[in-house]
Amino acid sequence: MSAAPAQRTGWWRAGLALLLLITTPIFAVNSPQDVRLPPLKARAAPAPALFSHWGHGAMHCYSCHPGTFPQAPLGFTHQDMREGRYCGSCHDGRAARAQTSMDCEACHARR
């Protein structure tokens, strides 16, 4: 006898969850610790923003990828963030500290 459709769906979902639990740490280990975000136009100062994957360690890769950010470095503006895109989707003062309340060097670090 064949398994009921709901039972087959349950196995499929359990398998997918197991796959995500196993592969997410593997992909996270292979991600760069810091990503320098490319500026939209060349400038001397401030330094381009530096994003730390490890500084956001409580988040999971799929929290931001590919919905908020593609898997490649992407330039954007402060106006984009104020409108709730890119970093501004979390750094809005509710989910995470508002980007307007942070020192410039928090993101635009020279290191």
Image (spheres, helix red, strand yellow):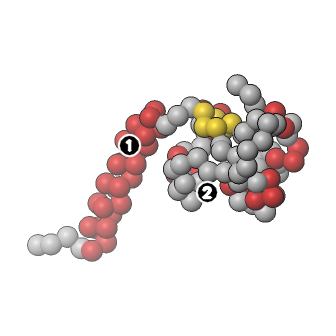
Give how far across and how far down residue 86 sits, in percent. 68, 55
Q: Is residue 85 visible?
A: yes
Q: Nearer the viewer, residue 84 or 8?
A: 84
Q: Is there CB contact under 8 Å for labels 2 and 1?
A: no
Give how far across and how far down residue 23 sits, in percent. 38, 43
Specify the amino acid type for callout 2.
Thr
Real-space Cα separation, disc 2 to disc 1, in angstroms: 20 Å
Left or right side of 44 for 50: left
Left or right side of 103 for 21: left
Of helix, strand and loop, which one carries label 2?
loop
Q: Is residue 81 above or below residue 103?
A: below
Q: Is residue 21 above or below residue 47?
A: below
At a point 31% along the width and 72% down the height, the residue shown is 6
Q: Is residue 22 above or below residue 70?
A: above
At a point 40% along the width and 48% down the height, the residue shown is 20
State the mark number for residue 68.
Answer: 2
Residue that carries the numbered disc 1 in the rendered image: 23
Of helix, strand and loop, which one carries label 1?
helix
Left or right side of 73 for 81: right
At a point 27% along the width and 74% down the height, the residue shown is 5
Specify the amino acid type for callout 1.
Thr
The furthest residue to the left: 1
Give how far across and how far down residue 107 sits, in percent. 76, 37
Give how far across and how far down residue 61 sits, in percent. 52, 46
Q: Nearer the viewer, residue 38 or 34?
A: 38
Quick one: label 1, few (<14), some, or many (20+) residues within 10 Å? few
Q: Nearer the viewer, residue 55 or 14?
A: 55
At a point 71% along the width and 51% down the height, the residue shown is 40
